[in-house]
Image: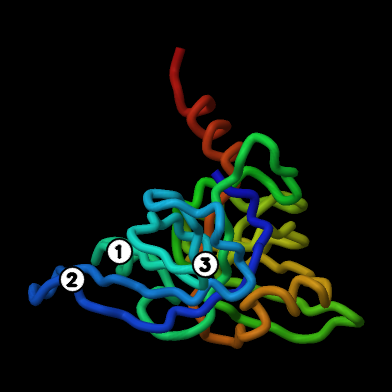
């Protein structure tokens, strides 16, 4: 479990194929940036842009993870060298500053707008139809591993568009600063929404 509060911005420094087959995954070597590595052990979970990955090797300044082809096909930002949002798995002693996050990407959204509004930045994302019902005004959503609050939702024929206001601090300390129209982003819905749907779908 995670909180959606980004601990550091790291960088994928190398990508190594795990085989010669078309469906082979890759090993990502990640520079941990400001993420402390002293308490990270092999097998620990670290979220990269909101996708939970398992540490398979580590150094004082970074780590490596293996990513399956299925995960690469269902996520954005893990198939190229560049910056990624990092968060270690939650411990019972940690503060829950964001919301409960599983690190499982539910779908990909597309940035429609990312522009200044007053002192903040407005982020508008187009979400796929199968995720639209989980997005609600003042509800929680994870975008590239960042826990955010939905400020507006507009349903469309293909899904929905939702907007978020980002304060300057969030923009500065995450990779969201690099977003632009057309960028694909990883989305995770609120865990509570999953359970509510499950309960309502059961017939007594």
Which residue is label 1 attached to?
Answer: 66
Crowding at label 2, few (<14), some or many (≥20) Cα neighbours within 10 Å?
Answer: some
Q: Residue at x 61, y 37 (%)?
A: 192
Q: Nearer the viewer, mark 2 or mark 3?
A: 2
* Residue at 47%, 63% in the rendered image: 128
- At x 29% / y 71%, what residue is drawn? 27
How many C-alpha atoms fall within 10 Å of the one at disc 3: few (<14), some, or many (≥20)? many
Q: Secondary structure at mark 1?
A: strand
Q: CA distance from mark 1 to mark 3?
A: 15 Å
Mark 1 burial class by Cα count in 10 Å: few <14, some 14-19, many 20+ = many
**Whether label 1 touches label 3, CB < 8 Å:** no
Residue 130: image location, x then y, percent: 45, 54
- As helix, strand or loop, the secondary structure at mark 3 comes to loop
Q: Earlier in the sequence, mark 2 or mark 1?
A: 2
Image spot of residue 181 (x, y percent): 58, 87
Counting from the top left corner in percent of width and height, residue 22 is at 12, 75
Above/below status of 103 relative to 91:
below
The quarter of the picture where residue 76 lies is bottom left
Between 21 and 7, the residue placed more toward the observer is: 7
- The one of 13 and 194 positioned closer to us in this rendering: 13
Q: Dividing the image into 4 quarters, which one contains the N terminus?
A: top right
Residue 117's label in the rendered image is: none
Residue at mark 2: 18
- Identity of the residue furthest to the right in this view: 118
- The residue positioned farthest toward the left in the image shown: 21
Q: Residue at x 44, y 18 (%)?
A: 203
Disc 2 and disc 3: Cα gap in Å? 21 Å
Residue bearing the label numbered 3: 49
Left or right of residue 174, residue 15 in this image: left
Mark 2 and mark 3 lie on one chain; the one further toward the N terminus is 2
- Judge depth for marks 1 and 3 and give the one in front: 1
């Amino acid at each position: 479990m995670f909180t959606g509060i980004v601990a550091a911005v790291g960088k994928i420094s190398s990508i190594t194929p795990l085989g010669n087959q078309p469906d082979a995954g890759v090993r990502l070597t990640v520079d941990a940036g400001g993420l402390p590595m002293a308490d990270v052990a092999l097998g620990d979970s670290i979220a990269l842009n909101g996708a939970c990955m398992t540490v398979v090797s580590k150094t004082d300044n970074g780590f490596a993870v293996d990513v399956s082809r299925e995960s690469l096909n269902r996520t954005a930002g893990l198939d190229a060298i560049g910056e990624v949002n990092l968060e270690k798995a939650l411990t019972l002693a940690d503060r829950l500053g964001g919301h409960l996050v599983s690190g499982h990407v539910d779908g990909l959204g597309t940035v429609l707008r990312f522009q200044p509004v007053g002192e903040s930045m407005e982020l508008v994302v187009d979400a796929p139809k199968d995720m639209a019902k989980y997005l609600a005004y003042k509800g929680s959503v994870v975008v590239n591993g960042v826990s955010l609050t939905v400020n507006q939702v507009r349903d469309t024929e293909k899904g929905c568009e939702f907007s978020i206001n980002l304060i300057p601090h969030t923009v500065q300390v995450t990779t969201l600063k690099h977003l632009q129209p057309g960028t694909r982003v990883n989305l995770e819905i609120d865990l509570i929404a999953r359970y509510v749907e499950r309960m309502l779908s059961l017939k007594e």
